[in-house]
Image (spheres, rainbow, N blue to C red):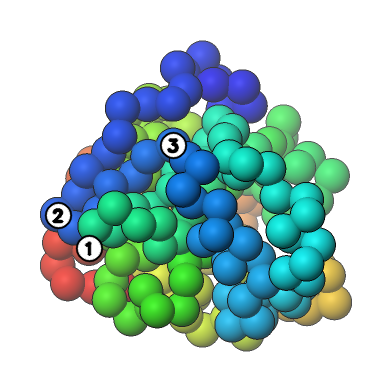
Amino acid sequence: MTGLGPVAWPPAPIGTERLLLRESEARDRAAFIELFASPEVRTYLGGPQSREELEAAMPEVPGRRPGLFVVDLDGAMIGMITLDRRDAERPGHIRPDAEEAELGYVFLPEAWGCGYAAEGCAAALGWFVGALPGEPVVLCTQTANDRSLRLAAKLGFTEVERFEEYGAEQWFGVWSAVTPSGPAGSFRQGRAAGSAALRAWGEGIG
């Protein structure tokens, strides 16, 4: 997989109790446009984009790239989950060489409050720890985004630092596969990281 390492992409679809994580398809185009145009979804992501511009620019099969999972519920896209390398030039890192894998997620408003984000992200993290064992995963979100902060905590992310970026305070955390061990920012490996994340949605959280 370009960017994340020597992993074949796309992987086989990942099924959970209610969801399917899969590669994007042409039928997902309308949902992609809705995600980028929604004021609710884009509140902490720089604001909504123009539907007209999205309709003109969106490819026939959007999101067809390594690291992007479409989250499918009963045959329809309700969101997407991404695992990308964090830009070395941005603040927020836990390794000297930077470019850690970074988890991202956006879901349509009608899918909020049902635990789908926790269920889908836990499955993606479980896949990641199996594909690239020992790799840390980081997450960055605005401190004003209470919903995202709650999800990060439920998934097992631990706060590392806060900083200003894009005109807002950002919360930066690392997944429980690696845990801070001191003020210098060194990290130690944890146990059962994948299974811990998968337990998160199974216990009814999110």
Q: CA distance from mark 2 to mark 1?
A: 10 Å
Q: Earlier in the sequence, mark 2 or mark 1?
A: 2
Pinpoint residue 178: horizontal percent, then vertical percent.
Answer: 44, 44
Pinpoint residue 24: horizontal percent, then vertical percent.
Answer: 48, 41
Q: Which numbered disc covers residue 161?
A: none
Q: Secondary structure at mark 3?
A: loop
Marks 2 & 1, CB-CB < 8 Å contact: yes
Q: CA distance from mark 1 to mark 3?
A: 22 Å
- Mark 2, mark 3: which one is toward the viewer? 3
Residue at figure coordinates x 15%, y 61% from the top left: 202
Q: CA distance from mark 2 to mark 3?
A: 18 Å
- Residue at numbered disc 3: 23
Q: Which numbered disc covers residue 201?
A: 1
Corner quadrant of residue 32:
bottom right
Label 3, residues with CA under 10 Å away: few <14, some 14-19, many ≥20: many
- Mark 2, mark 1: which one is toward the viewer? 2
- Residue at numbered disc 2: 17
Q: Amino acid at mark 1?
A: Trp
Pinpoint residue 45: horizontal percent, then vertical percent.
Answer: 70, 70
- Mark 1, mark 3: which one is toward the viewer? 3
Q: Quadrant of the C terminus?
A: bottom left
Residue at figure coordinates x 33%, y 81% from the top left: 113
Could you tell whether 163 is left or right of 205 in the image? right
Please count the marks in the image: 3
Of 118 and 18, nearer the camera is 18
Corner quadrant of residue 63:
top right
Marks 1 & 3, CB-CB < 8 Å contact: no
Residue at figure coordinates x 68%, y 43% from the top left: 59
Residue at figure coordinates x 46%, y 78% from the top left: 109
The reply to whether residue 17 is visible in this rendering is yes
